[in-house]
Amino acid sequence: MKDVVVVGLFNGMSVGRSSLDKSKWNVLRYYSSEIDKYAIQVTDHLYPQDREYKLGSVLDIDTAKLLAEIREDFPDIPIMLIGGSPCQSFSMAGKRNGASTTTNIDVVTLEQYLELKEQKFEFVGQSYLFWEYMRVLTDLQPDHFMLENVSMVAYWKDILSDAIGVQPVVINSSLLTAQNRKRLYWVGTKVDGEYTKVEVNQPEDKGILLKDILLDEVDNKYFYKQSYSLTGKVSGHVADVYVKGNESIKRVYSTDSKCPTLTTMQGGHRHPKVLVEAFKPSVRNNMIREYFDIIKSTKMIYQCKCTSGFQDNKVGILKSPTLRSGNPYTLGLTKNLLVRRVVPEECEILQGVTRNCTAIGWDCTKLKEVKISDSQRYKILGNSWSEPIIVHILNSIQTSSLLCK
């Protein structure tokens, strides 16, 4: 194993740290920069040895002081910089205004960013913080680096690539997990004083599907009572549940498909949803009791598919509507199917991290363990990396560095 000192920007729950531990690197010290309270608590619980090396906000990092400290303690050890800068303004699903000011100035170089920052310009969203990654990269001059971000329009991808000096590799986490998560990774290593791109091969597809990772039993609170309609597809997006919101949050997926990309899942009904066979839970709340009392009675789950009106196009746990000549598509389902959201523990599995690793945090002020709420666990995991992909990339960096010697 090769020794390394690591600086993790936008550190989240330290998936960079856990990935290094599962790769071919031996971490002598891990510095982290993060501002999310709950992500920090999870990190502090998982890695108590790193608590004294927290750097705070990336905006406040004194790079000269940091480099001097590293070199004083580890004069000959390679430095690695890793991070995934905020993506919302780069994302295809967002407004795509990228790294720009509130006065619509696109920030296209580090020099320009530093001038605008000095002049107290305000920036749109958080994606401009890519330039803080570049500031740290430029000042620290690490031996190796990795930057992660979302798929984005060519305009911004080219700007980021020109700044960092290498082209990204596109890898979908679906190759190693049950989640579709296509991301860009800029990966470089220093050769003769210049950064060169690390060639990262596509990992072999393990063919993991939702049915391979879903838990057999989950708490009743994760089930939807609302009716749903089937799309007619046999796999993938197989149903839509009747909840308020845009069409994307109504989608329900089959267990023999991949989960859509995890987001921070904040707000109503934004969690991925799956159509699962009903089971009899050990503790039944009123909602589930109602379901199972109906299932055990003469009533049944039905699908009614026609064009006569919204009310007929439902799946529900009610008596099947009367068959009539004008609606030949009324049919009873052969299985008892319910819609539920993916639970936090399953999101951990979808990101390839240790199960229940986000359930408990450490409060450094009160010096005690604290429970992390479901809402915060979803957010932390949605902002996180897919660990198996990061392990694959980190091993590629070491292989490249050995070949360059």
Image (tube, grey):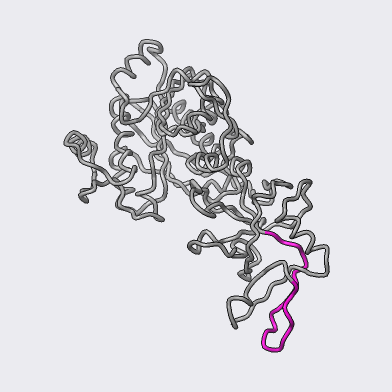
Which percent across, then down, holds residue 357? 60, 33
Which percent across, then down, holds residue 376? 52, 40
In this image, 144 relative to 362: left or right?
left
127 in magenta: no
Q: Mostly what secondary structure, the magenta segment?
A: loop
In this image, 285 relative to 23: left or right?
right
Residue drawn at the location 21% of the way across and 36% of the way down: 117
Residue 394 appears in view: no
Which percent across, then down, holds residue 328? 70, 84
Residue drawn at the location 36% of the way across and 43% of the way down: 167
Residue farthest along the front direction in this orientation = 286
In the displayed structure, 263 sits above or below 1; it is: below
Asked where in the image residue 236 lies, by quadrant, the reply is bottom right
Which range is magenta? Answer: 319-338
Viewer-proximal residue, 188 or 160? Answer: 160
Which percent across, then down, holds residue 263? 49, 48
Residue farthest along the top direction in this orientation = 72
330 in magenta: yes
Viewer-proximal residue, 270 or 116? Answer: 270
Residue 149 appears in view: yes
Quadrant assignment for the C terminus: top left
Quadrant assignment for the N terminus: top right
Residue farthest along the bottom direction in this orientation = 325
In the displayed structure, 338 sits above or below 13; it is: below
In this image, 146 relative to 112: left or right?
right
In this image, 343 relative to 386: left or right?
right
Residue drawn at the location 39% of the way across and 30% of the way down: 189
